[in-house]
Image (cartoon, coloured by chain):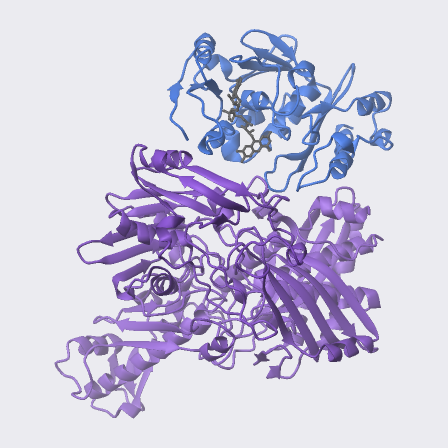
Chain colours: A purple, B blue
Amino acid sequence: MPKDSGIGASSKRREDVRFLTGAGNYTDDINIRGQAYVYFLRSDIAHGRIKSIDTSAAEAMPGVVRVFTGKDFEGVSGMPCGWEVTDKHGAPMQEPPHPILAQGKVRHVGDPIAAVVADSLEQARDAAEAIDVDIEELPAVLDMKAAAEEGAPLVHDDLKNNICYDWQLGEADDDKVNEVFANAAHVTTLELVNNRLVANPMEPRVAVAEYSRGTDEYTLYTTSQNPHVIRLLMCAFVLGLPEHKVRVVAPDVGGGFGTKIFHYAEEAFCTFAAKACNRPVKWTASRSEAFMSDAQGRDHVSKIELALDADNNFVGLRTHTYANLGAYLSTFSSSVPTWLHGTLMAGNYKTPVIQVNVRAMFTNTVPVDAYRGAGRPEATYQLERVIDKAARELGVDPVALRRQNFITQFPYDTPVALTYDTGDYNGTMDKLEQAADFAGFPARRAESEARGKLRGLGVNCYIEACGIAPSNIVGMLGARAGLYDAATVRVNATGSISVMVGAHSHGQGHETAFPQVVADMIGIDESMVEIVHGDTSKIPFGMGTYGSRSLAVCGSAMVKATEKVIEKAKKIAAHLLEASEADIELKDGQFTVAGTDKSVAWGDVTLTAYVPHNFPLEVEPGLEETAFYDPANFTFPAGAYACEVEVDPETGQVTIERFTAADDFGNIINPMIVDGQVHGGIGQGIGQALLENCVYDENGQLLSASFMDYAMPRADDVPFYTVDHSSQTPCTHNPLGVKGCGEAGAIGSPPAVVNAVIDALQSGGKAVDHIDMPVSPSRVWAAMNS
Amino acid sequence: MYNFEFKSPSTIADAVAALAGEDAQALGGGQTLIPTMKQRLAAPATLVRLGGIPELKGVCVEDDGSIAIGAATTHATVAREVADKYPALADLAGHIGDPAVRNRGTIGGSLANNDPAACYPAAVLGSGAMVVTNSRQIAADDFFQGMFTTALDEGEIITSVRFPVPQAASYQKFLQPASRFALVGVFLARFADGVRVAVTGASEEGVFRWAEAEQALNKEFRPDALMDLRVNPMNMIGDLHGSKEYRAHLVGVMTRRAVQACI
Ligand SMILES: Cc1cc2nc3c(=O)[nH]c(=O)nc-3n(C[C@H](O)[C@H](O)[C@H](O)COP(=O)(O)OP(=O)(O)OC[C@H]3O[C@@H](n4cnc5c(N)ncnc54)[C@H](O)[C@@H]3O)c2cc1C
């Protein structure tokens, strides 16, 4: 029986009432009396040396408060990178400076050169046009392989080359890996591109900053997934401000998908300018600016080799990847192609020898950082594509080949640094076979063929490492931050509860799901519990939302804090009931003395906590507890996806006819929200597989700079999904047994789509074994006719 | 956007007079012009709104049976009002952009703009329609003069478009996946005196008539009649959404589908 409230209930998302009726409060809705507007003059050249900037005409324009250039920030640190990757020889990565406004050089189209603060946005823009910038154009560094060559033009003149790091994970002994491949019965090799994406949350980035001369305090309102992280980075590493004088607020945020994790130059600029101009300042990105300044995603070029023995067991895996980091190191960019990617190359399979090689490159493009899935989609795509290709080469069933190589014993130590605590990959695949109706596929294919269409079925598995992660481990791996989270449970006198959480909700549904947990633990109505998030002056120091970590990490902190509250409330109840604390039970919001009918209600206990007339002397009044939670391990959601496509052989048009997801997310708090997360993730995965592509021309101009050329998935591009999450192996190391579900759809779906297209084409007798994403009609047609 | 003067005349004569001013520009539905102005790529000193001129709006059937559409008539109105008179044209208008675009964008604006991937130019050329302006009538074959270029003189405004109604017609649009303009669109119209085939989206020269296909179909009106015909990829558009060869190929596929739809 589905529950109608508490853990496991599909409670309706309470936040949607305000989102869907226009009652949300987004950063751009915030206007401060007397605010001035910021307009950034951005480079329209991908790579060039700034010879001079003359702002005098602009400064004299009407309404102009002040014009800033890189010179104004010479004493200020640049934007920091939050993760130091050590290369395979033990040396730290090359870490070039990232100034707030360009200094000396511009390094990508969109790099901010100057900023005008004016009374109105139009005046700021007019003045920006009057700034005279002389830039000597330099050859743009774009192709990653060419960029790595000796003598290539340098993105950063002070670095020895364009390689940020050469990193390796897994088997370090090349001879051993070579031997595995030399002795293999079969080797499948695949070269592929993981296409660059633009996250494009519906709400572009915004920053509003204010400074009070009276109190020397700053407030920054910003579109962020993690306000405390922004405050820490901006105060401690960029502007040198005391944290207690700075408040960072991330109010309603209209989608993040990773690209709002990072600390951006515009945030630091606005905070700085608010004091420098002694006026509140506001910057709202246009969509065009979002295309050229939001950190982008993916952009890997990989070669992957899979070695199999004569019985089709996987015996070795080797990858060589070029990862594009863009012009500067965005906050977590360095960790994405390494610890979030290399560690996942074992997938769901017991391959004994794995070697992952990643070369991360600087190029004259927008910085690349985490985007929904972050590294894990890149890993999954390589692995699941090469397995599919191997199955086709060997003439074996792709599902059977996967099953044969599944990890079945847990915990399992992979050769690439992770320990999977639990999972049931065969069980999840069983669910998929049922839900996707594999048995009916031949009939559906025949029906498509009768209409002149090719039909294909693509299957793949995925595993991800979520809940990022134990701080001591990530610290060893180079993270410059802890990755715990925190929650404060504040019980009000009348029994309602405010939970202040470090996680940030920007569409995920925390405001609904988190209260379900607390209400369930106490046995009160969900409506009595409210989540407070997104304001450093209200919430404890938590690390925010990304990596599908909110419930697994912050939710665990919330559970711990709630347990502390309950423990204290029992003391008070024991006093009121004149019983021993050990005999007190809490159920349905009533404290009872075990084995008696003596009870006291939750509300009476909470009132007593704040009106402590009749109170145990050894207990402090009040009822409020904070807990920090640092996980013992990552969580490992895993699943199996199936996609069925039809291909029009005349035009190459691919349509997705069916899409089925079987996921193991461990325990589930709100099934409807989980469905929604998977739906959204698959939508983005289908977007990557069929439509989205961020393209630069040979001069570094962004060709896909607007929605006219960057194809976002629309409702009619995706099918109705079948989502099954009845395969559940609870996480073994967090109190809720939850694993995280936010990124799975985006990680698991691209290979399913591409595998299905290849299956369709091969069924039509076309000798096509790979097409790079996006699998657009023109690419399919070209592949069919080459 | 830069500052500009805004005028909303109620007669064609007043509009023409207003457009004689320096850097004055006609405003139809604004679906192309306003975004361009917002990006500061266009900076007219005066915008002359045509939407307030009653004569420029609406659809009517002329004595000779042709359909006259006022230049300031929106795509949505055309989709609704010619649905039974000229279904292929209604279908085309009903699939331009999204509802917001269709409820503002106008046929006159679309033709004056002559975007190489726009739909209406294919219908006008494929139908052999007559473009009527404040000073003359221009046959479709003379009106379109390459990408974003038309026979219109400075300050001349389109007042209406007259479409002869064919026996059968079809518009086949293959979507550019991002903009959903035509990657290739083929408007085919079959009249008593012959077939016209107009292709949009494909050519560097903008909308064009595919003469070989017309000849072949005049001999034999079957999809197979086109099997051996190819348009030359050389003059096709090649961009991130499709190569020249792919567009050339699609011209054939879409034309055959249009023939099929007319049988
Ligand atoms: C999201 C989106 C999707 C779209 N999709 C499609 C599509 O699928 N297919 C398609 O064909 N189009 C599409 N369009 C374009 C749309 O059809 C526009 O409406 C059209 O291009 C311009 O018409 P308008 O009335 O808005 O003209 P405006 O933007 O007002 O003007 C365009 C130009 O025409 C001039 N002009 C306007 N009216 C006249 C006149 N009567 N006489 C002389 N000059 C005039 C103006 O001065 C200006 O130079 C799309 C547009 C958008 C924004």
Q: Residue drawn 78% across and 49% down?
A: A783
Decide if residue A220 is on the left or right side of residue A145: left
A594, above or below A671, in the image = below
**Which quarter shows the N terminus of chain B?**
top left
Quarter holding residue A567: bottom left
Q: Residue drawn 75% across and 28% down?
A: B262
Decide if residue B173 is on the left or right side of residue A517: right
What percent of the width, then of the height, locates residue A168? Answer: 63, 72
Q: How many marks?
A: 0
In this view, the residue in front, A263 or B60, is A263
Quarter holding residue A722: bottom right
A761, above or below A661, in the image = above
What percent of the width, then of the height, locates residue A427? Answer: 65, 75
What percent of the width, then of the height, locates residue A628? Answer: 36, 77
Q: Is residue A172 visible?
A: yes
B88, above or below A609, in the image = above
In this view, the residue in front, A321 or B124, is A321
Ligand 1 is located in which of the four quadrants? top right
What percent of the width, then of the height, locates residue A660? Answer: 64, 61
Q: Is residue A723 visible?
A: no
